[in-house]
Structure formats: C-alpha cells, structure tokens
Image (cartoon, rainbow, N blue to C red):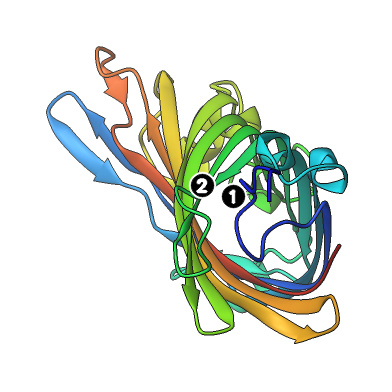
Amino acid sequence: DATPHRCPMGDCYGVRVMVGASSLFMRRLEVDVGTVGRAVDGEPMTSTPVAGVGVGFELYPGAFFTRGWFSNIGVGLRYSRSLGLSWKTDKMTDKDEATTITHQVISADFLRLRWQPVRDERIPTINFRFGLHHQEFLFNDTDDLAASPVPDLTATSLVVGLGLDIPIVTAKLFFGADYLAVQSWGEIMEPTTYRTKLSTDLLGPLHGYDVGSGHAVQAYAGVRGPLAWKIGWHLEVNYNYYNISFDKTSARKAEGSQDHFLGGVFYLTFAY
C-alpha cells in the first residue's frame, strides 16, 4: 500500500461527538494569609458533590481525505455545567449555606495533534493540545458581603498539554496533564472585593492584602471503549489545581492559597 498510514489504529475518526453526564465531586478553597509577625489561616470551604451535564466534540478534517499526517491535526470543544450546588465552611450553619451557585467549564482546543510512533494497535498514541480553558464558580450574589462569603472564580487560561492513550484489549486507558497559564481570575483576584470579603467574613481582624499572580495545572485519567457500530463510551476523572500567589513583599499578604476542583464525566460517543 503506497498510502502513508500515519493515523493511529482505532483513532482515525474525522469527527467525534460526546454527550453525557458530568459531576463536580469537590471544590475546596484554602486561604493561607500571613502578616508581619503573625499568620492567619482562613476557614477551608468545600462544595457538595453534585451531578451535571456535559457535551463535546473533536474534529480532524484531514481524516476524511487521507490517512497521512494531516489526518492527525484537529480542533476540539467541551462544555460542562454542574447543577444544584451548595457551599459552606465547617463553621457555617445550614441556614447560612450558599445554594445559588453556577459552576461551568469551557475548554476550546485550537490545535490537537495525535501521533503514534509505529502503526500498530498495541502501541500507545501520544496526544498534544493547545487552547483555552475557562472555569467559573459563581455565587450569583449581590454586593451584600453577608450573602457572599466567598469570591467568585472566573479563571481563563491558555492550555498546553500532553496525553497518552494505551490500548487494553478493546478499550483504551488514557491519562494526561495540562499546564494552565491563567490570564484572568475575575473577582477572586480583585483586591477591592476579594480583600474585603476575606477580611470581613473569614479572617476577622485582618484588613486586606495585596494580590500578585498565580498558576494552575490540570490532570485527568480514564478509560473509553466501543459499544456497537460507531457508538462508544468515555469515562474520565479530572482534577484542577489553582495556586494563588500573592504579593510576598507586602506587609499584608496571602502566600500559597489553593483552590482544588475534582470532577468527572461519563459520555456516550459517536465517532466517524
């Protein structure tokens, strides 16, 4: 066969559509605050596990015309939204529990590359992605600080990531990691709002601190396999970690504050 077969075995689809359920198992925000001469830790805050919905697609236009290198270049988009969230600290009563919350994640891959060193169904496939990742955790509140003990997070990031697909009988085990270069944080990094809310509702006598920068990473793992015809299934667990680094030269600072998201998805997929 004179045609170069560079498309990974079993992954030569041109389009894949994913529809199913998502879940946010946990969001935990830990605020570590230090001032000159003393350190104060904010009360950790945790969300309840909830279900949601998710959709996505991947498109590799070249796969409709060739099995060469161009069949491995594509784009992608995913969206998930959690439903029925509630949120409180260990010290909050049930009546203080925040329930009007929106959590959604949008991930857009401007470039996806899939590559297999040798065309063999037993050989793993390497995946590369570059794009945008946007995560929102919104309390849908007003300016009333008593009704809004925690700032909103609206983190928009550039994403660079690598993944690996490993064939196991008829299924595939996959895992990978992404670096999220956060471009904007929203309210969680605005000193005029976040500073006030933390000092007023969580940290008592501490009156604000200066913000600096931060970074984030994302890791995921799962398994997918066939059902019938071109229909398959996709099960995935994902973890997002945001490290919020504040101005360490300031008299009032928050060092190494951490925001954790643990979630998952189960999709039915159609690939062609």
Residue extending furthest front? 1
If the image is split into quadrants, where does the C terminus sit? bottom right
Q: In this view, does 99 lie above or below 240?
A: below
Along the line of sight, the residue nearer the viewer: 253 or 74: 74
Task: Give coordinates of residue 208: x percent, y percent.
Answer: 43, 26
Q: Is residue 86 above or below residue 39?
A: below
The residue carrying pointer 2 sits among few (fewer than 14), some (14 to 19) or many (20 or more) residues within 10 Å by Cα, namely some
Residue tagged 2: 201
For the residue labelled by badge 2, is the local secondary structure a helix, a strand or a loop?
A: helix
Residue at horizontal 36%, vertical 40%?
257
Residue at horizontal 24%, vertical 33%?
34
Task: Give coordinates of residue 1: x percent, y percent.
Answer: 68, 51
Q: Is residue 151 above or below residue 220?
A: above
Residue 10 showing in the rendered view: yes
Residue 92 showing in the rendered view: no
Residue extending furthest top? 249
| Amino acid type at image mark 1 | Pro
Q: Quadrant of residue 43?
A: bottom left
Residue at horizontal 65%, vertical 29%?
186
Q: In the image, 16: left or right of 48?
A: right
